[in-house]
């Protein structure tokens, strides 16, 4: 690439919780270290002195030593706005930020107050300034930052339950399952857009990161994901990165700018899940959420997800002359050791990832083509995402 041109990489949820985390990222570290800027989502707390929040349910908390490999593996920024931000309490959040900083990783979307959590993170890359604005719409009550109270930067969501006019039985049969529409709080959306507009004045590129969506469905985008993603770009964001679902979502283009609706998880250790769930609870989860429920899976002790949750990717944003000119991904498969392993797009495993992206994009009508056109990162071929013509 020419001078001043660069590649940004991004992945979904990252959380290390193992006795020896030093090799967790070995298969992908050469790729990450070869990129100019790498972002991910820190899906948990790194602390040796957790103070468990009363509202926390499944707590993602591991020792500080687990954070140490993240910087050396190639990560530059990890967003902290998500539903596990305060699993270790306020002290856990402080320890997490400090542990990541100690290994060379910056954080966005969290802070000691709402004003600090909302503040865009500015980083330099090949002579350009990049602003990262991070928000969460999926989180436990009390995890959001407030004036003088640590936490995450939120985009809160209203849920509206209704019986549509076309449902002939809904109006006459009590107990009919309602439909759900979701809308962002107007004040939170306005704050998000104001922060993006402000960031455009001090940065060459703005990337918006969101923890959002529903995790228990294969291919599904809520109303608010579409609304918030578009609103971010309307305000000036150059790209949108979504996560939380633990399963990949598709890529869309809006006003010539890419939206990665769901990056899935990348290396997300949940080794304690089998100790928390008895047989009755597992049966209940299966009955309620089906195959996409979270429960122990044979052969994958750190990854209690449906086999679709073993498909992941490294998202890529190609920047030329100060603008994002391309978007794509390197497909990866998560192995039984819970390591993301890059695979060739035309291999059997690579085709699983590419076909999955095509299928889910078509199911929610994103209008995106996934093609191989010679773009590569080192020896790894990239699948390019293009608007349908």
Image (spheres, rainbow, N blue to C red):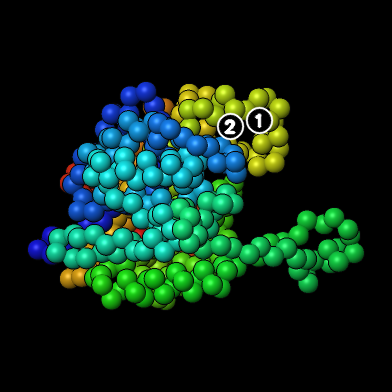
- Marking on residue 245: none
**Location of residue 158 (image quadrant):** bottom right
| Residue occupying image coordinates x 31% and y 60% | 121
What residue is shown with label 1? 282
Task: Decide which of tag 2 and tag 1 comes sooner along the chain.
Answer: 1
| Residue occupying image coordinates x 30% and y 64% | 131
Question: Is 44 situated left or right of 76 in this image?
Answer: right
**Location of residue 91 (image quadrant):** top left
- Marking on residue 295: 2
Residue 15 in percent (x, y) is at 40, 38
Residue 101 in percent (x, y) is at 27, 45
Marks 2 and 1 sit apart, C-alpha to C-alpha, by 6 Å
Classify 10 Å Cα crowding around label 2: few (below 14), some (14-19), many (20 and above): many
Residue 51 in percent (x, y) is at 50, 37
| Residue occupying image coordinates x 57% and y 24% | 275
Discs 2, 1 touching: Cβ within 8 Å: yes
Question: Is 381 situated left or right of 16 in this image?
Answer: left
Closest to the observer, 166 or 79: 79
Q: Is residue 28 visible?
A: no
- Could you say whether the residue bearing mark 1 is in a helix, strand or loop? helix
Vertical comparison of 309 with 362: above or below? above
| Residue occupying image coordinates x 42% and y 45% | 93
Question: Is 374 situated left or right of 261 in this image?
Answer: left
């Amino acid at each position: 690439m020419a001078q001043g041109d660069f590649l940004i990489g991004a992945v979904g949820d990252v959380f290390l919780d193992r006795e020896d985390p030093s090799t967790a990222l070995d298969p992908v570290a050469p790729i990450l270290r070869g990129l100019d800027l790498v972002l991910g989502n820190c899906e948990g707390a790194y602390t040796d002195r957790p103070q468990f929040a009363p509202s926390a349910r499944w707590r993602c908390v591991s020792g500080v030593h687990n954070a140490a490999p993240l910087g050396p593996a190639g990560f530059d920024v990890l967003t902290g706005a998500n539903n596990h931000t305060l699993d270790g309490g306020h002290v856990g959040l402080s320890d997490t930020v400090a542990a990541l900083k100690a290994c060379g990783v910056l954080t966005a979307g969290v802070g000691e107050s709402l004003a600090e959590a909302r503040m865009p993170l500015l980083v330099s890359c090949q002579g350009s300034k990049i602003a990262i604005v991070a928000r969460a719409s999926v989180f436990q009550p009390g995890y959001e930052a407030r004036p003088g109270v640590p936490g995450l930067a939120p985009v809160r969501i209203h849920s509206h339950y209704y019986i549509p006019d076309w449902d002939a039985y809904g109006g006459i049969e009590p107990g009919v399952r309602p439909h759900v529409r979701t809308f962002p709080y107007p004040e939170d959306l306005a704050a998000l857009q104001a922060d993006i507009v402000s960031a455009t004045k001090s940065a060459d590129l703005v990337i918006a990161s969101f923890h959002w969506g529903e995790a228990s469905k294969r291919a599904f985008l809520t109303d608010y994901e579409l609304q918030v993603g578009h609103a971010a770009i309307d305000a000036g964001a150059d790209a949108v990165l979504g996560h939380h679902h633990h399963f990949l979502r598709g890529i869309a283009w809006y006003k010539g700018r890419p939206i990665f609706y769901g990056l899935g998880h990348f290396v997300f250790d949940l080794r304690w899940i089998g100790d928390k769930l008895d047989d009755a609870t597992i049966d209940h989860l299966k009955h309620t959420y089906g195959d996409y429920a979270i429960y122990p899976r044979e052969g994958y002790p750190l990854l209690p997800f449906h086999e679709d949750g073993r498909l992941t990717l490294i998202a890529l944003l190609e920047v030329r002359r100060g603008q994002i000119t391309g978007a794509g991904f390197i497909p990866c498969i998560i192995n039984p050791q819970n390591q993301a392993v890059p695979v060739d797009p035309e291999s059997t495993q690579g085709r699983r990832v590419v076909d999955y992206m095509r299928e889910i994009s078509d199911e929610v009508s994103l209008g995106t083509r996934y093609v191989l056109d010679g773009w590569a990162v080192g020896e790894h071929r990239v699948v390019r995402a293009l608007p349908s013509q």
